[in-house]
Amino acid sequence: CLAHRHFRTAPAMADHRVLLLEQLKRKTQVGYRSSEQISREDAFVCYVEDQRRIQVEFRLAQLEPVFIDIRNIDNIRQKDYPEDNSFRWVLAINLNPADSRNIMLQFTAREVRDTWVAGLRALVDASRSGGLGGSGSSSSGVGGLAPQMSRGGGSSSSSSKHFMGGGGAIPISTPPATTQRSITDVVLREPRPGYLVRVELTLGLRDLQALEVPEGCETAERLSRLVQGFVDKNAIMPSESTSLFRFVKNAVQRIVLERETETLVEEIGCQHLDVLMRDRLAASGKGDIQEIRKEAMREAEWNLRALAEEVPRRIGQCGTGAAIVSMILQRNIEKMKLINDMTAKAYEAESEVVNKVTESGW
């Protein structure tokens, strides 16, 4: 019956809380940084229930363990930093003025980090509400987490409604909200024709979804709409959208940068004086070679000047490496100008020799 179904949710929630707390009590491998320890150190982190604090043990024996009192935690944030074709899964802990440290824990897997985020938030909320026991018993520590296990912090009874039947009020559970999933893996794949980037994402445990960026979607505004639509469609946690947008944007910028660089290098190479003269001779079939050379030289100078003005516009919006690539391309343009000048002088010297030989009658 409906009443029986409603009252059966309490043991299920308790079991989930016990499981969550047990996972936090296990030693978990992390990378540790803090406002006092800037360099990353390999460590193991766990929750010591009877002491109500987090313990960090370092791999290096000479480093003393670090402890974080649950009561001193002021804020907990999860951060995802793009790194090559994956992410760094980070849990940031800000402590109150009583401690004043800032701590970052980098986990090896997204699911493990998310478990710690949920568990720590529940522990902190329980501590603030006075429901976190300190007797060391499992039941006292877990029991205080009951109101905090839902995302909004409300108790299980707040999510139920009643209707009046013949036997009185019967509690009815409100259907839970759609479960939002986290991104557990990200891989770049070869895009299909007509697309710039293909990103394959694993959602939750095994749901594989592909995010494809079509040609013409290079601007930040279009990428933002595309990523947000993907997040909404696949019920991904809202906190994922920013890091996913940055990852996709970086991938798109790298592709655009490579394409534009190849195109500009080819366009610069086409401004070689020999190439322009060959094209003009092929088009006209005959004519004054000196006049053709002068026209080709003027065309090369004009085109190279135009390319020098276009490089910042075509490369300047393509990520952090754009400045270096732009500088290299500008140098290539200047080198091509010098090569053309030297080629023109060589042709002039050759013409003078030919003229002298012709005049001497040889």
Image (cartoon, rainbow, N blue to C red):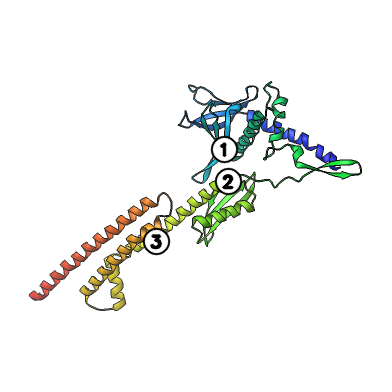
Mark 3 element type = helix
Q: Residues within 10 Å of mark 3 (few under 14, many from 20)?
A: few
The part of the image, by quadrant, that contains residue 281 is bottom left
At horizontal 53% and vertical 23% (from top left) the residue drawn is 65
Q: Is residue 311 left or right of residue 48?
A: left
Q: Is residue 221 left or right of residue 149?
A: left
Q: Is residue 173 left or right of residue 44?
A: right
Per the model, the C-alpha gap separating discs 1 and 3 is 43 Å
At horizontal 52% and vertical 62% (from top left) the residue drawn is 194
Closer to the chain start, of discs 2 and 1, is 1
At horizontal 33% and vertical 53% (from top left) the residue drawn is 328
- Residue 214 in the image, given as x and y percentages of width and height: 53, 60
Residue lying at the far right of the rendered structure: 166
Q: Say which quadrant the N terminus sits in.
A: top right
What's the amino acid at mark 2? Glu
Mark 2 element type = helix
Q: Residues within 10 Å of mark 2 (few under 14, many from 20)?
A: some
Closer to the chain start, of discs 1 and 3, is 1
Closer to the chain start, of discs 3 and 2, is 2
| Residue 263 image label | 3
Residue carrying label 2 = 240
Per the model, the C-alpha gap separating discs 3 and 2 is 35 Å
Residue carrying label 1 = 77
